[in-house]
Image (cartoon, coloured by chain):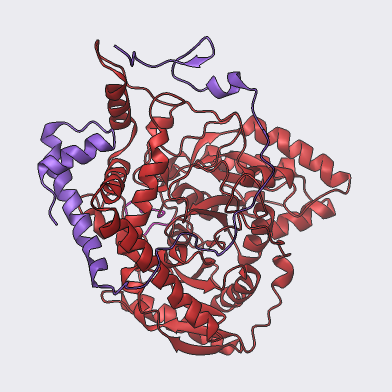
Chain colours: A red, B purple
Amino acid sequence: MTELNKLTIADARDALRKGDVTSAEITEACLTEIEGAGALGAFVHNTPELAREQAKAADARIQAGDAPDMCGIPLGIKDLFCTKGVPSQAASKILDGFKPEYESTVSQNLLDAGTVMLGKLNMDEFAMGSSNETSVYGNAVNPWKVDDRDLTPGGSSGGSASAVAADLCLAATGTDTGGSIRQPAAFTGITGIKPTYGRCSRWGIVAFASSLDQAGPMTKSVRDAAIMLEAMCGHDMKDSTSADIPVPNFEAMLTGDIKGKKIGIPKEYHMEGIPAEIEKLWADGADMLRDAGAEIVDISLPHTKYALPAYYVIAPAEASSNLARYDGVKYGHRAKLEAGDGIDEMYAKTRAEGFGAEVQRRVMVGTYVLSAGFYDAYYNRARRVRALIKKDFDDVFAAGVDAILTPATPSAAFGLGEMKDADPVKMYLNDVFTVTVNLAGLPGISIPAGLDAQGLPLGLQLIGRPWEEGDLLNIAHEVEARAGFVAKPSKWW
Amino acid sequence: MSIDIETARKVAHLARIKVEDDRLPELAENFNAILGFIEQLNEVDVDGVEPMTSVTPMRLKRREDVVTDGGMPEKILSNAPDAREGFFAVPKVVE
């Protein structure tokens, strides 16, 4: 078997069980690819020794007949996940040198399932960004190219997207606060699912906006997303918002039968300035679902327009509170102090040196909207609007809609540096189709569905009912089968 | 609502982020762009709508009120920039 790094999780699982290949061999193939892919800036802390040990253990487990589906599968882990003894710094200078003494619940669940960790993956600093340009490690680069320009893999899970699309690993973990799994998945032609809020424990994942953050898998197929999501999920006493409900066998729910499913097309997502080819892709996606026996219905989500502004109150507010812990005392970077500097100077200098420009901006916006006199006008108003946005979805689901189809992003991948001088709000528009899903706590999946005129991947998004990831994956699986997206980036790195 | 340089300075102080004076005008401009965007929320009729507290309606889990973890000062201090004699060390706080 050649090019083992290109395997899907499902194919690797089957080959491992048959004894056609070992985890050690797949792991070695990935490590070799990673070594040659420095230009992508995807892996930022490599753990080859750990990976080899884990692969050996996985092979022993498979031989003993005790092999969960994910056993022996080499993965990349986003730098936002705390991994015991391995640098975990959320792509920020302020966590320079931080090596957690503990393992995040999601990465522990994956380790318990026998997965292999190849290393940590690049991302936007503290997951704040849509282009992976705010990282202390430098940019992650999209393996897709159309000319001389380096393109963004999207963000914040840009390293994860780049690594999976370039076959440096079989799959990767991501996190999604406003679209950070789905947008990069769409930009790189891979699959990414953000589950229902509460499905994955947030414990040990560096917090950005706690009421919105969710972890999820970034994979080469919908089937892989189903397999890996199941391994990541589960109730955790250490996260008070973790849902104590059974995790189904998501893969078994990929039945191929979506007859009679009602799929909503929200009219508010026909936004001004969306390229015609994205509108066309969306219409094609609806046709695919119709051909598969689903019923397509027009729906309205009237508060859609207010999702981004509500998000840009709530997310910075929560961030300003969560990021208060980075003070130069407990971990990471501390600024050099002048004679006579007291503790306040230490905080202010440490945070000025340790946080990048976008993180500083959001922390200060959050501080402002929570400050005395503005709390009601901004923060409470945004939380009221959020309730209305969720009600929009509740009403549509109550009317019998099973899932909602939208584009994943308003454009294909853009060039790194092209948005540098744009006003920050312009970058925020990247999340216009994805952010509603976080505000409403719903599951959402991005599936590669076609190429634009330049030859860059475009994704479709499906939004599901709360806790019905299985049904959502089944519908996504039909779109995947009918779209038949098989294009891969040609290797230049 | 428009943010002036003084407000920007005050917010930076509240956030405990040192911002040099020459960077304050740009910061105020950034704030104004973002807040201008947020102003749209004023168009929404939110009368009688409760602010969302939990996106998935569920009761917080309870557990017995007992110590479940602890007794690991070395681990807690292992990542500190400055730790001495079992404590985090910081610049002098009391005069």
Q: Position of residue A24 (x, y in %)?
A: 73, 40
Q: Position of residue A98 (x, y in %)?
A: 49, 28
Magenta stretch: helix, strand or loop mostly:
loop
The verdict on residue A321 being magenta is no
Q: Quadrant of residue A41?
A: top left
Vertical comparison of A470 with B76: above or below: below
- The residue shown at (81%, 50%) is A67
- The residue shown at (85%, 48%) is A66
- The residue shown at (45%, 71%) is A390
Vertical comparison of A474 with A248: above or below: below
Q: Is residue A6 left or right of residue A372?
A: right
- The residue shown at (56%, 56%) is A216
Res A166 seen here: no
Q: Is residue A86 left or right of residue A267?
A: right
Q: Is residue A62 left or right of residue B92?
A: right
Q: Position of residue B65 (x, y in %)?
A: 66, 39
Res A30 seen here: yes
Viewer-nearest residue: A492 or A380: A380
Q: How many marks?
A: 0
Vertical comparison of A74 with A438: above or below: above
Q: Quadrant of residue A258?
A: bottom right
Magenta region:
A144-154
Q: Position of residue A20 (x, y in %)?
A: 80, 52
